[in-house]
Amino acid sequence: MNIVQIVALGLLTTIIIVLLKQNNANTYALLLSTTAGVIIFVAMINKIGYVIQVFNDLARRANVNQFYLGTILKIVGIAYIAEFGAQVCKDAGESSIAGRIELAGKIFIMVLAMPIVAAVLESIIRLLP
Amino acid sequence: MISLSDISLIFQIAGLAIITTIFYTFLKQVGREEYGFLAVVVAIAIVLMQVVPVIRDLFRSVEEVFRIY
């Protein structure tokens, strides 16, 4: 699975989408671009899994608290899915819906980050005389 | 690995799209625009039935990798 296949798939889909958009079949163009995006990401998922595996091992060796790493992973995942949805909506021209999706993603991420912020503040207060 | 089934999915959707578009424009000439629109809706339903499972797999694999439950 090398980069050449991914680029070829992307170019091929783009060409077909231009063809479809020409005789105004926009719904199919959107469906096709979403499908291509999904296929490319699903093809990369095990690479990302490997990188996360290495991060986990390093964190365990450096005995970083597992909770923090888990939260960071969740935040990255939520950010990715929200960005994916927002990008598809923007392609279709619905930037207002894209904005709503991004807002929801930010709120989810803030909710996840709250425990960490609390822990940081606690440690700062403990340092103060 | 980009399997062959993914690439054939893209070609399937493209083929269906082109056929229905041509069918729609043909029916518009004949004057049966509503039947053409019906054909387009049916084709989009077929394409959605194929695309939605792929998107569900994406979200499931993202949840699994990033452990969002």
Image (tube, coloured by chain):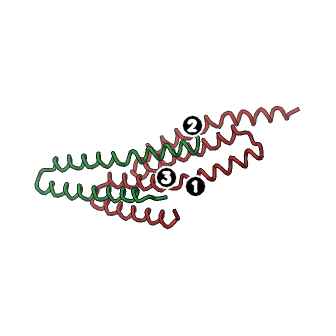
Chain colours: A red, B green
Who comes first in sequence, dot 2 or dot 1? 1
What's the CA distance linking mark 3 and mark 2? 23 Å
Q: Within 10 angstroms of label 3, few (less than 14), some, or many (20 or more) residues?
A: many
Query: Which residue does the numbered mark 2 point to in the structure image?
Result: A108
Circle 2 chain: A
Q: Within 10 angstroms of label 2, few (less than 14), some, or many (20 or more) residues?
A: some
Co-location on one chain, circles 3 and 1: yes
What's the CA distance linking mark 2 and mark 1? 25 Å
Q: Secondary structure at mark 3?
A: helix
Measuring from the top left, give residue B27's x and y in whole percent: 15, 54
Query: Which residue does the numbered mark 1 point to in the structure image?
Result: A47
Q: Secondary structure at mark 1?
A: helix
Q: Residue at x 32, y 63 (%)?
A: A19
Q: Amino acid at mark 3?
A: Val
Pointer 3 with pointer 2, Cβ within 8 A: no
Query: Which residue does the numbered mark 3 point to in the structure image?
Result: A42
Q: Residue furthest right?
A: A129
Q: Amino acid at mark 1?
A: Lys
Q: Secondary structure at mark 2?
A: helix
- Image quadrant in which the C terminus of chain B is located: top right
Who comes first in sequence, dot 3 or dot 1? 3
What's the CA distance linking mark 3 and mark 1? 10 Å
Give the side of residue A73 with respect to residue A41, left or right. Answer: right
> Which picture quadrant has residue A39?
bottom left
| A17 to A115, vertically: above or below | below
Give the side of residue A64 with respect to residue A70, left or right. Answer: right
| B54 to B15, vertically: above or below | above
Q: Residue at x 68, y 46 (%)?
A: A56
